[in-house]
Amino acid sequence: MVLDKIKAPNDIKKLEESELPSLAQEIREFLIEKIAENGGHLASNLGVVELTMAMHLVFQLPQDKIIWDVGHQSYTHKLLTGRREGFEHLREYSGMSGFPKRKESSCDCFDTGHSSTSISAGLGYAEAREITGDQFKVISVIGDGAMTGGMAYEALNNASRLNTNFMIVLNDNDMSISENVGGLSRHLGNLRTTYVYQDLKTGVTNSLNRIPVLGERMVTRIRRTKSGIKQLFIPGMIFENMGITYLGPVDGHNIGEMRRVFREASKVNGAVLVHVITKKGKGYLPAERHPARFHGAEPFKIDTGLPLKPRTTANYTDIFSTVMRKMGERDSKVVAITAAMRDGTGLKRFHNLFPERFFDVGIAEGHAVTFAAGLAAAGLKPVVAVYSSFLQRAYDQILHDVCLQDLPVVFAIDRAGLVGSDGETHQGIFDLSYLSSIPNMTILAPKNKWELSDMLKFALNFDHPIAIRYPRGEAYAGLKKYRKKIEYGKSELLCQEHEIALLAVGSMVKTAEEVQIMLKAMGYFCSLVNVRFVKPLDTELLDRLAKTHALLVTLEENVITGGFGEQVLHYFSEKSEPKMPSIMNIALKDRYVEQGNVEILKKEHGLDVASVLKQIVAGYVRK
């Protein structure tokens, strides 16, 4: 096998030209086999096999810097830099990450996981190179979807002023910008990247500008005429008008053509964008037909593409989807917003039934939130459905545009808590902290699937900002008999005894339920509280519990700083009662959590049943 010859960075340069097609095929077969077994990002990686090979053939790693936007398309890059063995434990705890990681390889020059960051990071590298006098190349690879993020355009605007080479590779896998214009585009690309053209253009402009009065007018008229003609032929005029040289479109599955264009791009004295057309999922028919389904795939059967373990029970996203459909039918003011995650957040059915009330704003969470604020100010009931870790990108808009005006925007926060295999950038473990710091915000967390339904209905009839955070995965179906009506700011007391009180937030109620049973079996008297409202605190219940319990234990799937437990601790620290209970906060430590199975991560970070029980027994001393 040709792939066997790739053991270290730049080994691809040792191959014969005739071996490259075989290598591309073997890489695809390898990725399909490994992802079918362990899960991972498939469609995006299959689409960039030749693109990655071409970059590794032209550039020298780790000296040159390739920055992958998002990074979920970096599997071929990992293979070509000698990390083949790491795929045996891809996205597992203590295994190889599914994203670029600087600590994993010197060929990964920037950690990524969220969208639209690569141009900014690459620009930083390019400017640093000029200051230090280094000689490396900088290449930022960004997808057409990531280009919907405003941060990408902020970086492009900044990059247009560069006087040093900086390459941006636009991976267009949906023909979203333009179709290939063939020979004319190639000719203009060759012409614009020659030093003669660049020098001539600068020289003519400077000469004309020295002519009094008339010179400046002539330059302006020539530019207008030239731009008008170029608009007819060059698909990249949006970039050219910003001052960024545009090359392409080029076939992203033609290695030879891409190598030629990358060499040309390296000659440009400034920012240059190479527009590459690829097919997402290329080489595996199920992924080509259903690229969204194979974006982040669970283990599947290679011959059919069907999951190895089909879901038989509803998850929290399914529950949200069903309730949104019902509320959309009942109330014409209910509208839904997503940032390029229609299927992932469960809004597909809402979109199909109420297309005029559904808005996909692209990968632009900040815009999504302020857009929702405008909808709310105009009298509608907007629901922003978003993953917890992605909502972080809209903190300023939540703070200033929604909460400052006290607007009734509902935040449906999916993937809250430990998410698992996607690692540090995707763990939703900060939302309770950053949302709790904002005035006018209300935060809820459901204990099971029925409570999510009730909370969403409550939220849509609430006249202030409100967030509901719920975890990834199967919706808990226990505690069905406990379904007390949602009352603003009130927790749900599931079991009342004395001595120890467990106050659990959302997904941790299930854990607390099991811990309570074990504590009772050990002879402890234990109350169980479903917190429901993280903000505002149910201070009335806290005061009652403080009178009858020696220990209050808070449990949450969030970092400890700024979370529910810290708020409870702060509340009691300000009271001057002579007799106060002890407070034990069980939460995640203030550090990033790597990839791995959620149950393993809970055990490693002290949130599983056994760990929680051990902490309580060790920390509680009966008087």
Image (cartoon, rainbow, N blue to C red):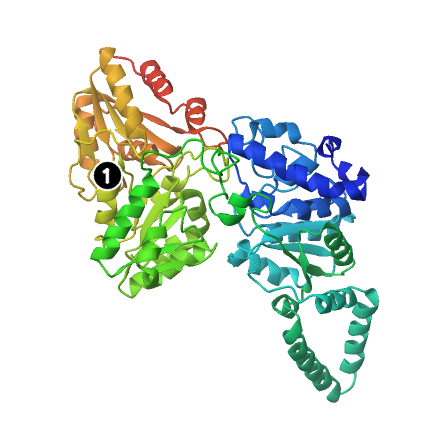
Apparent side of residue 283 relative to residue 453 in the rendered image (left or right) = right
Looking at the picture, tell me which residue is in the foreground, 221 or 142. Answer: 142
Q: Which residue is mark 1?
A: 451
Q: Amino acid at mark 1?
A: Glu
Apparent side of residue 70 relative to residue 580 in the rendered image (left or right) = right
Name the residue: 50% across, 49% down: 289
SS at mark 1 in the image: helix
Looking at the picture, tell me which residue is in the foreground, 16 or 114. Answer: 16
Apparent side of residue 396 relative to residue 41 in the rendered image (left or right) = left
Q: Does 442 appear above or below 199?
A: above
Q: Position of residue 424 (x, y in %)?
A: 50, 36
Name the residue: 23% across, 12% down: 521
Looking at the picture, tell me which residue is in the foreground, 459 or 53. Answer: 53
* Residue 182 visible in the current orientation: yes
Q: Quarter-wise, where is residue 43 in the image?
A: top right
Q: Quarter-wise, where is residue 277 in the image?
A: bottom right
Looking at the picture, tell me which residue is in the foreground, 351 or 341. Answer: 351
Image quadrant where one finds the N terminus = top right
Q: Does 264 appear above or below 491?
A: below
Q: Quarter-wise, where is residue 528 in the image?
A: top left
Q: What crowding class fits label 1: few (fewer than 14 Cα within 10 Å), some (14-19), or many (20 or more)?
A: many
Q: Does 112 appear above or below 311?
A: below
Name the residue: 28% across, 56% down: 408
Q: Position of residue 46 (x, y in %)?
A: 60, 44
* Residue 97 visible in the current orientation: no
Q: Does 337 appear above or below 321?
A: below
Name the residue: 61% across, 41% down: 74
Q: How many marks?
A: 1
